[in-house]
Image: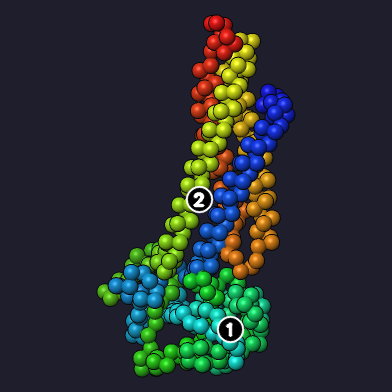
Amino acid sequence: MFLAWREIKHSKLRYALISLIMIMIIWLVLFVTGLANGLASDNASAIKESPATYYVLEKDSDNRIARSTITEEQWQDMQTVYGKKAVPFSTRMSTISLEKGTEKTDIAYFLLEPDSFQKPTLSSGKFAKENTNEIVVDQKLARNGYKLGDIIEDTTTNSQFKISGFTKNQTYSHSGVVFLSPTQWKEINPVSSKNNTTYNTVALSISENEAEKFNQKELTIAPKNEIVQNIPGYSEEQGSLTMMIVFLYIIAAFVLTVFFYVITLQKMDQFGMLKALGAKTSYLAKSLLTQIGLLSILSLIIGNGLTYGVAAILPESMPFKLSPLTAVLSSLLFLAATLIGSVLSLYKVAKVDAIEAIGGNN
């Protein structure tokens, strides 16, 4: 610790530049990670936040909600078996505008059975009253200028609804969710009638053991995480961002390995002198690791602070989500990559010959 800290104080500019590079790398890694999590949440939070654990879909739907059709008869059969643990669910993408407004907003309609376990938590306002045109919508619409009491109009059917409440974290396919009662759902789907009611899926709040007992020929059951992965564009979007993050870690490991290796080469004479004076290889290795660890930890603290500082001033429209746990895990992974990258420098220190380093063979 003494040797490591003395050297950092002696060569302030050199280590300040290395720290700056490390700060920029960890900032970039954390920022991209936050964007990846934010986009994932913006694409699927309405499904992720749902209390449902499994979804029943049509067998050839590839676990995609929009491709599935559940008949009223099939739903009634499941209700008989699962009771209140089963709720019919449908979704549909659409466009709305304020009453007599010109600006349009993309939204996702969700069928919401009154008093079911899928009922979202309100952030403001109140739940819609039965047999009214009142609806609950996601807070994303508030960022687009919609307010409590506003009348919205479906641009396809011209159906009008009054906003009575807002929810949080209820987005689907990067669009705010608008929750509709069964009566309102039929209003925007004129084809549906009492004699021809269909749903996309049935949401179940059941255990894994109960799910394993599910057996219906024309239907399949899928856990919530599979439904999320099969939301159009979700896997592709997350796959691309994850690949970017992985490459950032790899690049960081290589860059920092080269930096510390070059610095180690420049100090071979000093290491040789210290060995000639009796310093053990383990002491020098410990000093090098301490030095790298100090720089890494300092860079991580500043990088995390910088990330959360920038996140605080980002516009609400930008999807960014970085939990403290994710930040800590990313920081630990970065620290591990840095220490692993120091192995080459440690090998060079271990192999240095004291006599050769101080020119004893000349």
The mark found on residue 245 in the picture is 2
Q: Do the residues labelled 2 and 1 touch (CB within 8 Å)?
A: no
Residue at the spot 35% in from the left edge and 76% down from the top edge = 67
Q: Point out the frontmost of discs 2 and 1.
A: 1
Task: Residue 44: give x, y in percent of width and height.
Answer: 49, 68
> How many numbered circles are shown?
2
Residue at the spot 53% in from the left edge and 16% down from the top edge = 352
Residue at the spot 42% in from the left edge and 68% down from the top edge = 231
Q: What residue type is labelled 2?
A: Ile
Mark 2 and mark 1: Cα distance apart in space: 37 Å
- In this rendering, the answer to whether 220 lies above or below 190 is above
Q: What residue type is labelled 1?
A: Glu
Mark 2 vs 1, N-terminal side:
1
- In this rendering, the answer to whether 299 lies above or below 270 is below
Mark 2 burial class by Cα count in 10 Å: few <14, some 14-19, many 20+: some
Mark 1 burial class by Cα count in 10 Å: few <14, some 14-19, many 20+: few
The answer to whether residue 51 shows anywhere in this view is: no
The quarter of the rendered structure image containing the N terminus is top right
| Residue annotated with mark 1 | 103
Residue at the spot 48% in from the left edge and 82% down from the top edge = 94
Task: Residue 276: give x, y in percent of width and height.
Answer: 61, 10
